[in-house]
Amino acid sequence: MSAANTSPADESPRAPAVRGEIVVQLTGITKSFGAREVLHGVDLSVHSGEHVVIFGPSGSGKSTLLRTINLLEPPDSGSVRILDVEYGPAGDGEQRRGGPVELRRLVGMVFQQFNLFPHLTALDNIGLPLRAAMHLGRSEAEERAAAALKRVGLLRWAAHYPAELSGGQQQRVAIARALSLDPKVMLFDEPTSALDPELVGEVLAVMRSVAESGMTMVVVTHELNFAREIGDLNVFMDEGLIAESGPRGFLDSCANPRTRQFIAAVL
Amino acid sequence: MPVAAYQWSLIWQNKDLLLKGLLVALECAGPALIIAIVIGLLLALARMGRPPLAWLATVYINIFRGVPALVSVIWVYFGWSLLFGINFTVVEAAVIALVLLYSSFLSEIFRSALLSVPRGQREAGLALGMHPLRVFAQVVIPQATRVALPNVGSMLIGMLKDTSTFSVIGLAELTYTVQNIESVTFQPFVLFTALAAVYVAAAFVIDFIFRTIEKSLTTPPKGRVSGALTRRRRRRLELLVERLEAVV
């Protein structure tokens, strides 16, 4: 089903009122692992500045769907369009096509397990991709990395290694790392699920500030209170399909009994 | 035979010959290690890749893991000469023999080290827009190196010891030298005790060197050597942080 039926339901100060161009457009995405198909043809459109929240039970395919956006899981069929360039298996001859490296320079990702590089300091974790992917010089990369760390309040920890940081701090560095590359859209794959409960807040605070800055975001999360707060489009996935989706306020007004049951169980 | 008959002074008298023998052994083991590391890494990647390359690598590894150094060097030195008419010098034959054997051992060390790097590390590098080869070189290899390094040190010690069998092709390495001295002095106990001591001492030094490298690769780096190496960079970082903190 299409998820592009958003309408501004309530005028929360965080809701970007203007609907921009489509940044991410997934059409008919299917993906199988071996004989098991985990995505059965999913459509999703993400507009510029929009905050899409994807939730649903384990195994519903929400993380896999997110990972097809930057081709960490290349879809078996369907179209992945980022800013009108086709990166998926579908697409006609007319459409401009791009490769995965090109796509990933437009799309930032934050992982559940942080995935900071343990052999590099916080600063070099951010500096390495700036040099390797954006081909900045060493001092320019360091300046930019330091500015990114400052943005998440961790400049003082620049010379520390991931093993010396708390989980919450590591995830904040990971967010800074993805942001420093100036992506057009940020993907968050259960960014707080691996954290101690007391560390969840600091990561959500950083994500909130990212959302307020107008960044386009797609967030897979079980933090439904946070979802209610930032979600312009709320997507409930179940068994490899989008079961139901809706605009701001959807979590309190959804019709599908399966969605209601899930929300009641999580909240 | 009375104790006085042991001429321990022989060791000191022949110290230059012993040292030269050790250097010859190292001249074989050192280059052989470097070449074996390169080939071992390629073998590991081939084995982790697709067939038929993976099968070929597996066959190679399983053959050469099982060949003793003595057999390998005779095969290279005499066999290739007979079969292909290729005549190697003794040093070349020694290096090739070691590379054939140890590239197979090293490839298994590298394979397990590469597999020990979590999948998420590679994914993070790719997701950040890095080219897959750069992810391999700058994210996967540094982490795998740390895992492989202690075993690589053991391999170098093993190579050095295996050169002792190369006296069979007339390589003038340490054991060959000692055998020569023994044949004119008839002091096997003294000379072979000294021989063992030199090998053990060399192994200690190699172990020390690899431990030092290992320490500098831990995070945060430990040890004086790495501390000295990173001091300037740390200082520069501190200045950068101070300057940026001042800007509100």
Image (cartoon, rainbow, N blue to C red):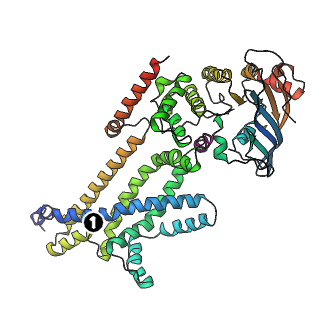
Q: Quadrant of the N terminus of chain B?
A: bottom left
Magenta region includes residue B120: yes
| Residue B43: image location, x then y, percent | 52, 62
Disc 1 residue crowd, few under 14, some 14–19, many 20+, Cα 10 Å: some
- Report the magenta stretch's main SS: helix
The answer to whether residue A262 is seen in the rendering is yes
The residue that mark 1 highlights is: B24
Q: Nearest the camera: B161 or A88?
A: A88
Task: Please give the range of residues in magenta.
Answer: B119-128
Q: Residue at x 60, y 39 (%)?
A: B128
Q: Quadrant of residue B84?
A: bottom left
In the picture provided, is B106 more to the left or to the right than A237?
Answer: left
Q: Is residue A104 left or right of residue B13?
A: right
For badge 1, the amino acid type reads Val
Percent x, y for residue B53? 60, 65
Left or right: B194, with B61 as reference point: left
Query: Residue A145 or A54: which is nearer the viewer?
Result: A145
Q: Position of residue A169 (x, y in %)?
A: 55, 26
Question: Depth check: B68 or B26 in front?
Answer: B26
